[in-house]
Amino acid sequence: MKRTAHSKVMIIANRLVKQGYNRTNAMVKAWVLIKMQSVSTKVSGVTYGKRQQAIEHLTHYRPENIRISLYRDRTNAYDCNAVAVIATVRNKGAYTMGYLPKALAAFIAPLIDSGKMIASRFREIRGMYQPFMNYGLEIELRV
């Protein structure tokens, strides 16, 4: 069944309302997400486990050698829409860097569940300029 833009917006808005957004903000955010060709976002959960070390390790590689992929994590106990962000360095291996922010995951998860391919790309590592500051990871998604 092919969904119209309006029905997609309603599905996304309803999920955002369940996550605590008020109806007006959920509708606006849903329309923006549907109409955008791409969105840049910071990855959440980058301070958990050894993810800070993994992100710091990425600084040793050229950006064109870093590939970002998304994995729909249906077993996540904290978010039923969880989408893991995995960084792979050419010829080195892969590591889970964190997750998409909850509101964005509410939009992306149903698309992944329906079989839609979501293109993802490494943008930059943040926080490298001061000691004792946590690293952050920014990615771009194309729907």
Image (cartoon, rainbow, N blue to C red):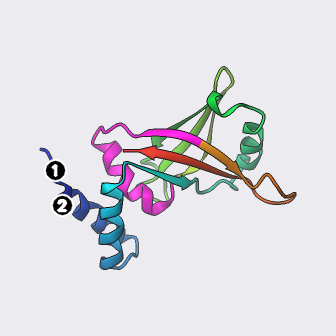
Residue 77 image offset from top left, x and y in percent: 49, 57
Quarter location, residue 57: top right
Depicted 45 relative to depicted 90: above or below: below
Depicted 58 relative to depicted 31: above or below: above
Along the line of sight, the residue nearer the viewer: 92 or 59: 59
The residue type indicated by label 1 comes to Arg
Quarter location, residue 112: top left
Q: How busy is the neighbourhood of tag 1: few (under 14 within 10 Å), some, or many (20 plus)?
A: few
Q: Mark 2 — residue?
A: 6
Residue at screen point 51% across, 59% down:
101
Residue at screen point 37% across, 48% down:
37
- Residue 91 located left or right of residue 5: right
Question: Magenta segment range?
Answer: 100-122
Identify the secondary structure beneath mark 1: loop
The residue type indicated by label 2 comes to His
Q: Is residue 74 visible?
A: yes
Depicted 5 relative to depicted 24: above or below: above
Image quarter (top left, top right, bottom left or bottom right) of the C terminus: top left
Q: Mark 1 — residue?
A: 3
Depicted 17 relative to depicted 99: above or below: below
